Image (cartoon, rainbow, N blue to C red):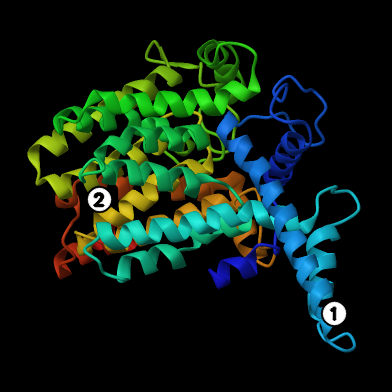
């Protein structure tokens, strides 16, 4: 927690500036007319209503924290003789009125408060990992120190960890006496980060297999209605169908890959290719949907064949990581759920941990790619840009190979002296000729 709080003011991604603008607008004007407003400093709203309500709550929290700190500063300076707490006075000025620069209109304190929610979500995820992985401190510790986890929350300020916290809670609840909360928790995840939609088919399947009451789906409907109604005078269902889908999912040109180190980058590199291009008579977008269907069918087969607890871990990893690798339109951050589910999966298969660790580093490099923060990693930046971004294709190929090896550990060759010699011959033309 302390380490993450130390990081919050070290970098500011342009995304958080957009988020701050949306939250401040709702705080000042209310949610009505939010999506119809066309005057934005950075970008138009592209997030669901609940996410924007959280950004507005962040603004309110900043105002509350500033007020409490200012009151405490006043009381201490009034009671104590002389200026005994100058550090608190300086903090109040900086937190409440400090700016990154004259071009950015938001207070540093507000931007830091936006990052506070995903940081707390990191700790919540660590707690669930602790209970999910046999109450051992090793696995939540691995998660918390993994670069991708603090990079997404404390550095970037993205809410992927918040959405994942609710998604993981939803799946965990299905195996407890609180299973009625499961659908509501998953829908909360979707309403915060729609990327959690990839888990909906398997969740419904598990819900059916566990013979839970379908009345539990009333809760997510209420959540959706309550969080969406303030934004529109229309029926929320009609608003979602005709407006939100366009705003959230059709916000840009449909591309094969959007800065993601996945299967498609192996072939297209860093090019912006429309997902409508056809391969064997079908668009790449359609191939991605077919892959998603195959992934979900595979997850169901895994669940039916293997021991339940291990099967759920593996199935969720297959869905989270496989969707990122083979579906189109993937952003770099969309691997977050697959990576955390992967950690939970390998906690029961220690021999696969090294593969996961390598992929987690590749994931962090993918997050760093095109943002280039921290700036001190100039050598890494040059390597990623060299030879027409060739290294990014190699890393994408490595990620796909790691996924296959983790799903099918039997495919991993045993590192015997004979196999090691064959590998050296394969990589060295002269040795291959001698062999």
CB-based contact (under 8 Å), mark 2 and mark 1 = no
Q: Residue most toward the bottom?
A: 81
Disc 2 vs disc 1: which is toward the camera?
Answer: 1
The secondary element bearing badge 2 is classed as helix
Q: Earlier in the sequence, mark 2 or mark 1?
A: 1
Distance CA(mark 2)–CA(mark 1): 60 Å
The secondary element bearing badge 1 is classed as helix
In the figure, residue 346 lies in which quadrant?
bottom left
Residue 367 x %, y %: 55, 51
In the figure, residue 304 lies in which quadrant?
top left
Residue at horizontal 88 percent and vertical 85 percent from the top: 83
**Residue 202, which numbered label?**
none
Residue 140 x %, y %: 36, 65
In the figure, residue 123 lies in which quadrant?
bottom left
Residue at horizontal 33 percent and vertical 49 percent from the top: 341
Q: 237 or 199: which is nearer to us?
A: 237
Q: 423 or 92: which is nearer to us?
A: 92
Q: 262 or 415: which is nearer to us?
A: 262
Asked if residue 408 shows in the view, the reply is: yes
Report the quarter where the C terminus lies: bottom left
Asked if residue 251 shows in the view, the reply is: no
Query: Relative to 368, is 353 above or below?
Result: below
Question: As drawn, is 402 to the left or to the right of 82?
Answer: left
Residue at horizontal 58 percent and vertical 21 percent from the top: 229
Query: Relative to 100, is 301 above or below?
Result: above
Residue corresponding to mark 1: 77
Q: Residues within 10 Å of mark 2 (few under 14, many from 20)?
A: many
Residue corresponding to mark 2: 406
Q: Residues within 10 Å of mark 1 (few under 14, many from 20)?
A: some
Q: 279 or 125: which is nearer to us?
A: 125
């Amino acid at each position: 927690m302390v380490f993450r709080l130390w990081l919050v003011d070290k970098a500011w991604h342009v995304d958080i500036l957009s988020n701050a603008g949306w939250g401040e607008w709702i705080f000042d004007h209310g949610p009505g007319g939010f999506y119809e407003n066309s005057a934005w400093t950075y970008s138009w709203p592209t997030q669901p209503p609940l996410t924007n309500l959280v950004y507005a709550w962040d603004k309110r929290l900043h105002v509350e924290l500033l007020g409490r700190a200012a009151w405490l500063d006043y009381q201490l300076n009034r009671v104590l003789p002389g200026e005994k707490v100058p550090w608190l006075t300086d903090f109040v000025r900086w937190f409440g009125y400090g700016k990154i620069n004259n071009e950015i209109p938001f207070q540093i304190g507000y931007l830091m408060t936006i990052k506070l929610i995903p940081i707390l979500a990191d700790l919540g995820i660590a707690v669930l990992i602790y209970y999910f992985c046999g109450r051992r401190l090793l696995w939540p510790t691995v998660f918390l120190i993994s670069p991708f986890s603090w990079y997404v929350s404390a550095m970037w300020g993205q809410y992927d960890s918040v959405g994942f916290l609710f998604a993981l809670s939803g799946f965990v609840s299905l195996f407890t006496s609180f299973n009625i909360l499961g659908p509501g928790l998953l829908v909360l995840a979707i309403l915060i980060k729609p990327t959690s939609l990839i888990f909906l088919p398997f969740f419904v399947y598990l819900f059916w297999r566990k013979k839970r009451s379908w009345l539990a789906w009333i809760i997510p409907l209420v959540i959706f209605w309550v969080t969406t109604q303030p934004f529109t005078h229309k029926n929320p269902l009609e608003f979602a169908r005709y407006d939100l889908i366009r705003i959230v999912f059709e916000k840009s040109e449909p591309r094969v890959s959007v800065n993601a180190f996945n299967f498609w980058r192996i072939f297209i590199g860093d090019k912006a290719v429309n997902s409508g291009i056809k391969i064997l008579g079908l668009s790449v977008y359609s191939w991605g949907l077919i892959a998603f269907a195959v992934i979900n069918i595979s997850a169901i087969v895994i669940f039916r064949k293997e021991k339940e607890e291990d099967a759920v871990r593996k199935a969720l990893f297959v869905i989270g990581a496989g969707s990122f690798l083979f579906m189109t339109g993937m952003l770099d951050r969309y691997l977050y759920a697959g990576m955390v589910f992967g950690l939970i999966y390998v906690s029961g298969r220690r021999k696969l941990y090294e593969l996961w660790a390598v992929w987690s580093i590749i994931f962090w490099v993918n997050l760093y790619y095109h943002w280039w923060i921290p700036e001190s990693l100039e050598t890494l930046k040059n390597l990623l840009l060299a030879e027409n971004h060739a290294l990014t294709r190699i890393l994408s190929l490595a990620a796909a190979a790691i996924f296959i090896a983790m799903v099918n550990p039997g495919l991993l060759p045993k590192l015997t002296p004979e196999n090691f010699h064959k590998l050296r011959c394969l990589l060295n033309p002269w040795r291959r000729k001698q062999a």
